[in-house]
Image (cartoon, helix red, strand yellow):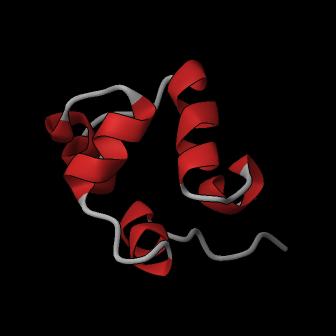
């Protein structure tokens, strides 16, 4: 059975209360992109997924709830 999907906001909080702006800078995207990902408005491109996982110190399987 798959683990419950952890949210990007939860991961940001787990990482020293990282702001959306700080995460956006680490991944190389706009703050609006991070907001859209957190609200499930847009999907994360594969290249950004790897950067996002690295910035949040997590795995793609945890982030995607696999």
Q: Is residue 56 above or below residue 15?
A: above
Q: Quadrant of residue 51?
A: top right
Q: Quadrant of residue 28?
A: top left
Left/right of residue 60 with respect to residue 33 in the rendered view:
right
Left/right of residue 2 with respect to residue 58 in the rendered view:
right
Q: Nearer the viewer, residue 23 or 10?
A: 23
Left/right of residue 63 with respect to residue 66 in the rendered view:
left
Q: Is residue 36 above or below residue 48?
A: below
Q: Nearer the viewer, residue 47 or 61?
A: 47
Percent coordinates x, y for residue 48 in the rendering: 51, 27
Residue at the far left: name it.
32
Q: The N terminus appears in which quarter of the rendering?
A: bottom right
Percent coordinates x, y for residue 66 in the rendering: 76, 58
Left/right of residue 2 with respect to residue 37 in the rendered view:
right
Q: Quadrant of residue 6?
A: bottom right
Q: Residue at x 63, y 53 (%)?
A: 64
Q: Residue at x 30, y 55 (%)?
A: 38
Number of marks drawn: 0
Q: Residue at x 20, y 30 (%)?
A: 30
Residue at the far right: name it.
1
Q: Is residue 41 above or below residue 18?
A: above
Q: Residue at x 63, y 45 (%)?
A: 54
Percent coordinates x, y for residue 61 in the rendering: 75, 54
Q: Nearer the viewer, residue 27 or 10?
A: 27
């Amino acid at each position: 059975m798959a683990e419950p999907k952890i949210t990007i906001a939860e991961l940001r909080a787990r990482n020293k209360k990282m702001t959306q702006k700080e995460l956006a800078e680490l991944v190389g995207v706009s703050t609006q992109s991070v907001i859209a990902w957190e609200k499930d408005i847009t999907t994360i491109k594969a290249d950004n997924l790897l950067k996002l996982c690295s910035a949040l110190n997590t795995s793609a399987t945890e982030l995607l709830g696999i």
